[in-house]
Image (cartoon, grey):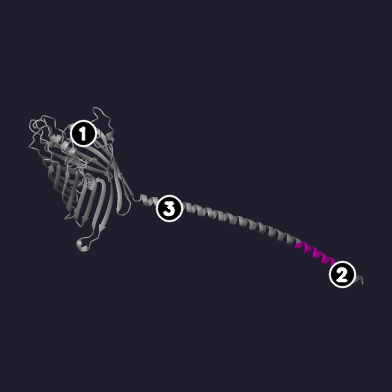
């Protein structure tokens, strides 16, 4: 039996050994499972934290995107608003000299223009002008230049504009376009308004200042159909000025000058109209006129300028007039062809009891290859003042003006004007005063 017992004991020891090894393996496996469970738990916790961080980050991103979007919306809204805004203007610097004044440098105008298009058919616009010369001090030597260009600061234009268009059947030549302006603006219902592309001479000169300053305050309606135009205006009347601004500014030569003032005594309301037709491209002809009552201030200025005050030489009794009506009518022509331009206006009418006519002709040629334009203008004002021959009343003298002009374009927004004004007066015989008042200037205009 001994041989049988030995193998049995050896087999039991081997089983126990295997069980021990297996148990150890199971313990190791359990430890690994515990480690893995711990790692899984940690991973879940980290994932939860990451999820929370991701949610927070997404919320922050959404918040930032909302803020940026809001800012872009504000910028977009501002862009839409400012996209309707048009800014412009210019600065005009001048070197001027004449027979009655010394040479002087001046900045005659600093203009700021703003236009806002509220809708497609409604706009508002104003032009603010600043004249540095108006800041000249008082005293001898300064009075010749102080405020000669007008008030130091003023609104040259300020108006609301309403546009419309009526469609007509094709056989009637297309739509009727209309424009209503309310406020202060250039008068396009009387002759050729010297502004924009129609303005050639930099200085308004004889004809325009003795006939119309072109600015009005009131209501203006402008309409066009096919090749026709019809413009109408009702406004505060032009006032008569006693200013001695003819030719060389200190010359002391008075003349029947008009200007648009910001005061009105309610007696000099005016109306004007212009009908025009363009038979061919480049040519426009018009008929025009206006009527107004002169204010009490205008009557006083008229009698003073015309020598109607009692005791004046050649008119001892004075003979002042009480005729307070003023009217003018006439025609105009503007023709442009290639490099050539011809422009002319003629008016006749009556100021109080003085009959008068005013006219000018102007020709121009554009030397495009040298960016240079040449113009020559002749203007004349004639007054029927023979009934009261007061030789001291220089406003009643006939006068004329010859103006050569060169415009050199450095850049589309930078121009140089070279102008000279030869002035002729039909002064009465026996008058010994110095009436030489030719003048000229070189001017640099920068548009912005």
Tag count in the figure?
A: 3
| Position of residue 328 in the picture relative to residue 78 (left or right) | left
Q: Is residue 188 visible?
A: no
Residue found at the very far top of the displayed protein: 140
Towards the viewer: 215 or 338? 215
Q: Which mark is residue 97?
A: 1
Mark found first going from the N terminus, 2 or 1:
2
Magenta region, residue range = 7-26
User: Which callout, 2 or 1, points to the residue nearer the camera?
Assistant: 1
Q: Secondary structure at mark 3?
A: helix
Answer few, some or many: residues within 10 Å of disc 3's Cα (few below 14, many 20 plus, some between 14 and 19): few
CA gap between label 2 and label 3 equals: 94 Å
Q: Which residue corresponds to the image point at 25% horizontal and 27% vertical from the top-left? A: 139
Q: Is residue 73 above or below residue 213?
A: below
Mark found first going from the N terminus, 2 or 3:
2
Q: Which residue corresponds to the image point at 20% horizontal and 61% vertical from the top-left? A: 172
Mark found first going from the N terminus, 1 or 3:
3
Q: Secondary structure at mark 2?
A: helix
- Residue located beneath label 3 in the image: 73
Label pair 1/3, CB-CB below 8 angstroms: no
- Residue located beneath label 2 in the image: 8
CA gap between label 2 and label 1 equals: 143 Å
| Position of residue 142 in the picture relative to residue 8 (left or right) | left
Q: Main secondary structure of the magenta part?
A: helix
CA gap between label 1 and label 3 equals: 56 Å
Q: Position of residue 394 (x, y in %)?
A: 13, 34
Towards the viewer: 190 or 312? 312
């Amino acid at each position: 039996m001994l041989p049988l017992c030995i193998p049995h004991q050896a087999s039991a020891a081997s089983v126990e050994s295997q069980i021990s090894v297996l148990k150890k393996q199971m313990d190791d496996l359990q430890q690994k499972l515990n480690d893995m469970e711990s790692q899984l738990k940690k991973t879940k916790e980290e994932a939860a934290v990451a999820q929370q961080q991701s949610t927070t980050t997404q919320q922050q991103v959404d918040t930032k995107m909302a803020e940026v979007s809001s800012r872009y919306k504000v910028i977009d809204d501002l862009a839409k608003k400012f996209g309707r805004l048009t800014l412009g203007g210019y600065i005009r610097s001048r070197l001027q000299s004449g027979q009655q004044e010394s040479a002087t440098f001046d900045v005659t105008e600093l203009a700021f223009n703003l236009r806002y298009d509220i809708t497609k058919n409604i706009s508002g616009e104003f032009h603010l002008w600043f004249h540095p010369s108006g800041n000249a001090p008082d005293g001898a030597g300064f009075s010749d230049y102080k405020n000669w260009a007008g008030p130091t600061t003023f609104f040259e234009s300020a108006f609301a504009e309403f546009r419309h268009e009526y469609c007509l059947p094709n056989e009637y030549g297309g739509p009727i376009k209309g424009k209503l302006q309310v406020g202060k603006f250039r008068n396009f219902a009387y002759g050729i308004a010297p502004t924009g592309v129609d303005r050639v001479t930099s200085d308004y000169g004889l004809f325009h200042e003795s006939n119309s300053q072109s600015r009005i305050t009131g209501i203006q309606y402008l309409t066009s159909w096919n090749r026709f135009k019809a413009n109408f205006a009702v406004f505060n009347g032009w006032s008569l000025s006693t200013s001695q601004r003819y030719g060389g500014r200190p010359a002391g030569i008075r003349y029947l000058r008009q200007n648009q003032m910001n005061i009105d005594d309610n007696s000099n309301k005016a109306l004007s109209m212009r009908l025009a037709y363009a038979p061919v491209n480049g040519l426009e002809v018009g008929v025009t006129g206006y009527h107004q009552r002169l204010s009490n201030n205008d009557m006083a200025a008229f009698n003073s300028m015309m020598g109607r005050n009692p005791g004046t030489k050649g008119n001892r009794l004075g003979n002042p007039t009480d005729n307070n009506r003023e009217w003018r009518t006439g025609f105009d022509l503007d023709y442009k062809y290639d490099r050539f331009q011809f422009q002319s206006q003629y008016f006749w009418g009556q100021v109080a009891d003085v009959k008068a006519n005013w006219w000018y002709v102007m020709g121009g040629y554009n030397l495009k290859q040298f960016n240079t334009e040449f113009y020559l203008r002749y203007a004349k004002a004639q007054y029927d003042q023979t009934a009261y021959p007061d030789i001291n009343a220089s406003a009643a003298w006939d006068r004329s003006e010859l103006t050569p002009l060169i415009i050199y374009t450095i850049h589309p927004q930078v121009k140089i004007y070279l102008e000279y004004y030869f002035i002729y007066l039909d002064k009465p015989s026996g008058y010994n005063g110095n009436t030489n008042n030719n003048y000229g200037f070189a001017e640099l205009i920068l548009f912005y």
